[in-house]
Image: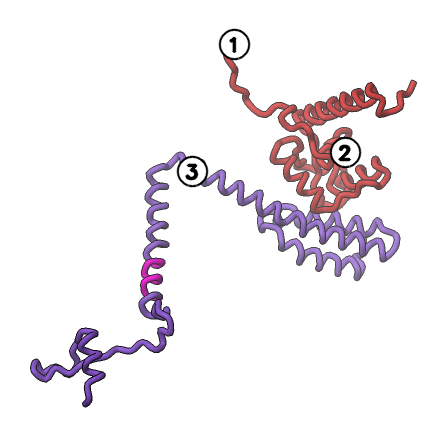
Amino acid sequence: MPVTRVERRARRLFGVVLHLYPGSYRDEYGREMTLVLLDRLRGERNAAARVVVLFAAVASVFADAPKQHAFLLAQDLRLARRLIRRERWFATVAIGTVALGIALPTAVFSAGKSLLVDALPYREAERAAMAWVTNPRQGRDRDVTSYPRLLSGCSSPA
Amino acid sequence: MPRTRREGPEPDDFLPLPRDTFDVLVSLADRDRHGYAILQDIAERTDGRIRLSPSTLYAVIKRLLESELIEELSERPDPAHDDERRRYYRLTPFGRRVAESEAARLTRLLADAKASGLMPRKG
């Protein structure tokens, strides 16, 4: 049976939409689903009915694809749970390694961010300044001092 | 009495069947069919009220295959008169028992409805 232009377009559109499905499901049933859709389009008498059938099929894929993803995810989780129960020590080491691999970079990033990137935890932190005093007796240009001495030094005439 | 461990699922474990699932099983009860023939059969039996989309049909078929209620045929029943890319499906003996159990359940429901006056009694 010759393929019409409408069928070619429908096949192309449906082929794109089928990518919403998991790959394994699409490989297994995608071609059959397309054949069934083309058969249904051929069974309709007028163009308007064919458009309705096509869009209903596309909408149905949008509704069904998340369910298939969820089903596959649940299947994978069940398999993982069975494997973890069967190989407890291996699973413990593997999960511990993954946990460390996540925790260490997170800790380093958190420390680096708070030390180097984030603003100081004070109001108007941009006005914060560092004050040094000279200490000629000990030969230091930049020496630390106490707050009262610093105040007395500032208030005393130069 | 000690409980014996069951070998596998029983037909009643699948009940009640979703409407689409039962329709597909009924469609395969009398002959092996490919996907589009299943759709056509369901549409004819329901006077066009139920027209499954391809995605709904194959979601049902996938579930039925995984539950071993239907099986895919390795050969096509009528290779001279159809597309070689089509896959045919057949009801398994267990699938037939499940469909029969569902039919019996629906019959009991109808009988209850008739007994309570919800449906007109014929004959």
How busy is the neighbourhood of tag 3: few (under 14 within 10 Å), some, or many (20 plus)?
few
- Point out residue A66 in the picture as x, y percentages from the top left corner: 61, 49
Residue at image position (19%, 89%) is A157
Magenta segment range? Answer: A105-113
Under mark 3, the amino acid is: Leu
Residue carrying label 2:
B27
Contact, mark 3 vs mark 1 (Cβ under 8 Å): no
Q: Position of residue A138 (x, y in %)?
A: 8, 80
In the picture of the structure, the residue carrying the numbered disc 1 is: B1
Query: Residue at 59% of width from left, 50% of height from top?
Result: A22
Q: Earlier in the sequence, mark 1 or mark 2?
A: 1
Mostly what secondary structure, the magenta segment? helix
Q: Which residue is mark 3?
A: A83
The secondary structure type at the circle numbered 1 is loop
Q: Mark 1 is on which residue type?
A: Met
**In this orientation, which residue lies closer to the viewer: B63 or A110?**
A110
Front position in the image: A118 or B21: A118
